[in-house]
Amino acid sequence: MPNILNVNNVKKSYRMGKVLVPALRGVTFNVEKGEFLTIFGPSGGGKSTMLHLMGGLDRPDGGTILIDGLNILNLSESKLAELRLTSIGFVFQFFNLLPRLTALRNIELPLSIAGVPEREALSRARGMLELVGLGERETHRPAELSGGEQQRVAIARALITNPKIILADEPTGNLDTKTGHEIIKLMKKLNEEKMQTFVVVTHDPLIAEEANRIIYFKDGLIEGIEENRTVTRDE
Amino acid sequence: MTKTSKILGMAFENLKQRKLRTGLTTLGVVIGITTIITLAALGEGFRVEIQQRLESGFELNVLIVFPGSFLSGFGQPFGPTDVDNIRNVSDVTHIAPMMTIPTAEIRDKNSSKLGAFTVGAVNFTDMQKMLPRRFQLMNGTFPEAEHNDTIVLGFKVAYRNGTALVNVNDNLTLIMTTQSPPYRVLANTTLRVSGILQEGGTSGITNFDYWAFIPLGTGAEIGGGEKYQIILVQVSEPQKGQQVARDIEDTFQNPYSISVLVPTSLQRQVDNILVIVTIFLLAVASISLLVAGVGIMNIMTVSVMERTREIGILKAIGAKSRTVLAIFLAEAILIGVIGGAIGILLGYGLSYELAGGLSGFIQSQQQADGLFQNPDRQPLGITPVFSLEWTVVAFVFAVIVCIVFGLYPARKASKLNPVEALRYE
């Protein structure tokens, strides 16, 4: 499988007041097309920072990140936004839907930003809503949806632009175990049926269980990589 | 284009979600624009009113020459040489010298006083040529030069509230005294009413409603020679007034010993003053719009902080900084457009409301001051004047103020780091 993403000796520090706190201290790995990769580790290990860098929300202090062959370090602010719009989908722990928009409009938003005509955008958004099993919830606003439903809307929004990769940051972190599991199942299904590449950051071992590959993060370094896992489905 | 409408739609939705806040922010713009529109309309209305009064009160091609100046008081009256010198100034087409006898008193046959302010001694033919529109008879005839026992009355000397106090051919007693104590009677003659002038109506120097006129010869006889207090000078065209005035001044050894009233330059000066006053008022009103702008900046800065997370989300899903900037600027522009439009409408309404009140106030002041005691004098009334230019300027100004003050918070929003914005609680 070709690599969609190359991470090579990436370093990143944050300034907390006067202290420079290293979050990543030289990390190297690849993401292959179609895989379900989990970055696993305790909080504060640099997982989220890694995800932000992979999604072009931030730039590394050192090393290179190639998204589909493009070095994000060389991209302008505006090109980076374009890359996020067309190649990356984000799923967050706190869903991050726009509270004033309906489920349908939240899903449609990236297409709207991309300038897709409204009629087409809405019909594609409806299709996505069906795909994540919320066809009946079209006109509901986030506050009228359960946590699990909100996360499904968020997944649909991430998926709508046919991104090369979906980056999920603790997607079950704000859900109960059962709902969390359903969300992971949904992502697995999309991964298997649509060959959608997923990178999921988590500290939940149950989710890591579902991954093809697990990268263990600790203190800003990779502790180990568990390759070629065959996932036994439990149903 | 679809993107622009999309951004505007989004901005509109955002504003709608915060109705109270949007309303209050817009109110600032509304107040500013209402004030500007109202002051512009009333200022222009006042200017037009004053101009009309000046035009109806003066003949624009007639200069008024009198001895002395406003500062030094009345000087020596003009003599026959002065009259001839003025007559010879180029572009002077006609002149009419006049003697005024302000202490004159007129009594009718029952010895009751008639309300004449001034008695003027004139050549009636000259006066008719000078002021063909104004110096016209309603009844009777103008006296021939040799008929020195006749008098012509101004309309309001002869008529009070529509009733004639005196008729043509009635005899009146004219008593003239010296101008300062001890008052000495110069003349006490009986005169026949030869004619009654048409009503002048409007204000101005050439309104003779409260005047009475006697032939020049009679005046010279009573006043002891040809001593003119006023010389009316007709110029070939109103634009030459200024030049002719200078030339007239040059015919005197001391140009400061006389004054020449040029209606066109008076008109221009009054106009300039009114324009300056209007501009000053508008400048003050503009400050209120700037205050509204600060309000917009304030509210938008708060709004950007509140929506930090939302901005982070927008950026994470691929919105460019430019798009975020556009969304926030669009909100500011919408506030300007809505506030401007409401302000213009309110300004129109308020102008009419205030014009009525203001006219009433001016009239009551005039009466209280005794400035215009005559009740049937046409009262000063202001009609607001709206110009498309001013309306457009005010509207554009409102939108520009909103853009300028919205730019800082909008830029702040667009520059937010997405990672930090997403972390914002």
Image (tube, coloured by chain):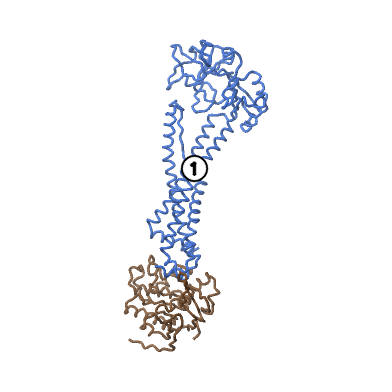
Q: Is residue B223 above or below residue B394?
A: above
Dot 1 surroundings within 10 Å: few (below 14), some, or many (20 or more)? some
Q: Position of residue B155 (x, y in %)?
A: 48, 21
**Drawn colour of chain B?**
blue
Q: Position of residue A183 (x, y in %)?
A: 36, 78
Q: Is residue B306 above or below residue B157?
A: below
Q: Position of residue B69 (x, y in %)?
A: 58, 26
**Drawn colour of chain A?**
brown
Subunit under mark 1: B
Q: Is residue A10 above or below residue B280?
A: below
Q: Which secondary structure, mark 1? A: helix
- Foreground of the two, B313 or B112: B313
Q: Which residue is mark 1?
A: B281
What residue appears at the point 33 percent right and 68 percent down from the top-left corner? A144
- Foreground of the two, A202 or B40: A202
Type of amino acid at the residue the image marks with label 1? Leu
Query: Is B79 displayed left or right of B400 in the figure?
Result: right
- Foreground of the two, B89 or A132: B89
